[in-house]
Image (cartoon, grey):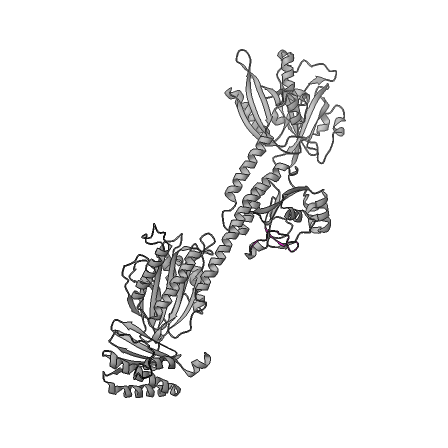
Amino acid sequence: MRYRTASGDRPDDIPDAAFAATATTDERGIVTGWSEGAQQMLGYRPEDIVGRPAADLLAEDVKEMARQPRDGLLERWSGRATLQHRDGHRVGVRVLANRREAEDGAAEWFVVSAVPRQPHPDHSNALVEWTFAQTPCALAIYDTDLRLERANAGMERVLALTEDQIRGLRLSEIATGPEADRTEEAMRLALASGEPQHVESYFRAPGESRKHAWSVSAAPLRDRTGRLRGVCHVAQDMTEQYEARQRLILINEAGTRIGTTLDIAHTAQELADVAVPRLADYMSVDLLTFLHRGDEPLADPLTGGLPTLCHTAQQSVLEGCPDALVEVGAMTTYPAFSAPAEVLATGRPAKYETTESTITRWAADDPAVAAWIREHGTHSMMVVPIRVRGITLGIALFARHRRPEPFERDDLLLAEEITARAAVCIDNARRYGRERTTAETLQRSLLPQRLPTQAAVEVASRYLPAGARAGVGGDWFDAIPLSGERIALVVGDVAGCGLQASATMGRLRTAVRTLADIDLPPDELLTHLDDVVVRLSAETCTTRDAETAGEIGASCLYAVYDPVSRRCTLARAGHPPPAVVTSDETAHILDLPAGPPLGLGGLPFETSEIELPEGSLLALYTDGLIDGRDRDVDEELNTLRNSLVQPAPSLDALCDTVLKALLPARPDDDVALLLARTRALHADQVATWDVPYDPAVVAQARQNASAQLTEWGLDEAIFITELVVSELVTNAIRYGQPPIQLRLIHDRTLICEVSDASSTTPHLRRTRVLDEGGRGLLLVAHLTTRWGTRHSHTGKTIWAEQLLPASRDCK
């Protein structure tokens, strides 16, 4: 820049040292700031000029400003001006004015004019001049005050200013913004340290439509004596390398951020979150509906006409996604000529400008699309099919409306790459979801569909599968009616998850029911169940590993409650102990012998027997209920005890209370919970007689039974009951050992039991025509609903159950 009088001669009072005159004005043109350089140039002190209109300094109108192109709001002006010195002479200067934001947030103009020192004689060297002018880099030289002395054509293009317009200015005065400040700081550090400095910048230069990446070097310049004379500023356009690196970073980020869960919708949202804002200003994911229904995919998504897609995920640079075409979860069908339908049909990605015929026709047919393009300024979009293993899962739509540059071929390749990664994760989630649904369906089908109605207890249950990552496990529960109005309560857990655990659970539950039908005591039942698990483990082992134990692990708690004696017998195999709430509303955990887990083989199990008053609450559960991540087991058990004593209108409601108190929304492990409130059969429902060891008392036993039935009002059952009592008492006297006892139980059914001290078990056999005996048990079997034998430590009991007339009618 030149500083001259109106006559064109350099005035004598201008020093050889370079300086800059700066001032600031508000939007109305009132001077708000005045530098020492401005005072040196025009002679005015700050108190003389601040607050006055800047136009007072002009010696003539500035015509050049009116000729500047105005695309929107003017941000910068550069030109010549003739100013009035305080002593009256005219001063011709080059002026650069930048519009910026003041400290109070209002707009102001920063005006600067420079007086450079005289050019160095060495600059006349032609070879140096050619090199300086023709180097492909943007090159500039600054003096030790960091004021520009030379700038080549490349730097002029970057700054959109000529060398003459900016000579004598600092970079922070030529271009405003953090990148200019960082570069100037690097030049200052290069002068201070004597070492080259390097800076990477990414910004949109004046006059450019898009941002560029620059590798900037600042190197100190020394003369032959080693004295610092200035600094060289070199900027190399590295946009292609920068963008390639950013694409690789985005691909790597997609690999780590997409697919963190096995949830389809969450994975789709992760794809949208990765793409915005790094690649697009708006992105949406539409998936074919078979993914959400769990159906098998179609080879051709257009089979049967235009498919319906579910708008599964979206993301935008605008808060709240106001630029969304539809809401998440909405179903949509695209016209056959639209860009999404075109991509679905071809299976190939495509990019579009909104001025292309495909988009304009789509917008003309769909007012929502037209409004989307018009209101948000959408100018470019890409549509990428979500495909994996030859199967189309949906489409991904990318759009730009804030970034001015349209999508390019490299952007389409990048979108295709990250979408392909997401497609694999979505398909994995689909396949896992299908397997999980299958396992859960199998699991629930193997569990009791409804618990039986019986006299011993009131029961309620819950089963919760684990969260998506853990998968369905092998927890189960059961309530099994036993003879004598007793009931068996069972809770078990098979280690592992998935179909194998569910199938193993089903086999063990069947085994428990089979063993319960023969009325085994809890400890003996667990011993037999342990053998079953050992055999199942052996079946799953390979030949080489046939002797490996513990391939299948399981635990079980088995309890038998007798409503007549109000006693409960329990045994457990590596399972958490049950909780009991007694009539005084206090809850405690039963101290039962732990017992080894099922599958170890050969280790004994122990039983415990407790008396439960009528109305007591028994809670059986699997370890998923109390194995919390954030709390230890003792704390979880305390929470369980507290929740069990909470008032609830029903056992079902109490189940919900317990689960809410102990579990998150998606538990990490399967949970089975079985609650049982005990009932009791009172003395007027049970009749017991000791029977002498003498065949002559059979008739008396029949009379006693008949009299009791008459008292209960069961005259219709007398005939069959007399036959059953006669047969069972006779067999006990003939084949058993004293003491002998007869018992009748009247509840929903009528049960006849005869006990003796012998362990010999009677068997049905088919009698021949001439046989005089052997028809008794066959007759009992035909006349009653069911019959059987159960053993105890003191002998055996033969029982027979018959439906009462009212029960028979209900059945």
Instruction: Report the side of 750 relative to 72 (left or right).
Output: left
The percent position of residue 646, horizontal first and vertical second, equals 41, 65
Instruction: Report the side of 657 relative to 414 (left or right).
Output: left
Regarding residue 705, the answer to whether it shows in the image is yes
Q: Quadrant of the N terminus?
A: top right
The percent position of residue 370, horizontal first and vertical second, equals 71, 48
Above or below for 743 versus 423 = below
Viewer-proximal residue among 495 and 800? 800
Does residue 783 show up magenta in the picture?
no
- Residue found at x 57% / y 46%: 272
Q: Quadrant of residue 663?
A: bottom left
- Residue found at x 58% / y 20%: 232
Q: Quadrant of the C terminus?
A: bottom left
Write the start and end of the magenta stretch as one range: 296-314
Regarding residue 278, the answer to whether it shows in the image is no
Viewer-proximal residue among 665 and 11? 665
- Residue found at x 56% / y 35%: 246
Instruction: Report the side of 794 relative to 807 (left or right).
Output: left
Above or below for 571 versus 283 = below
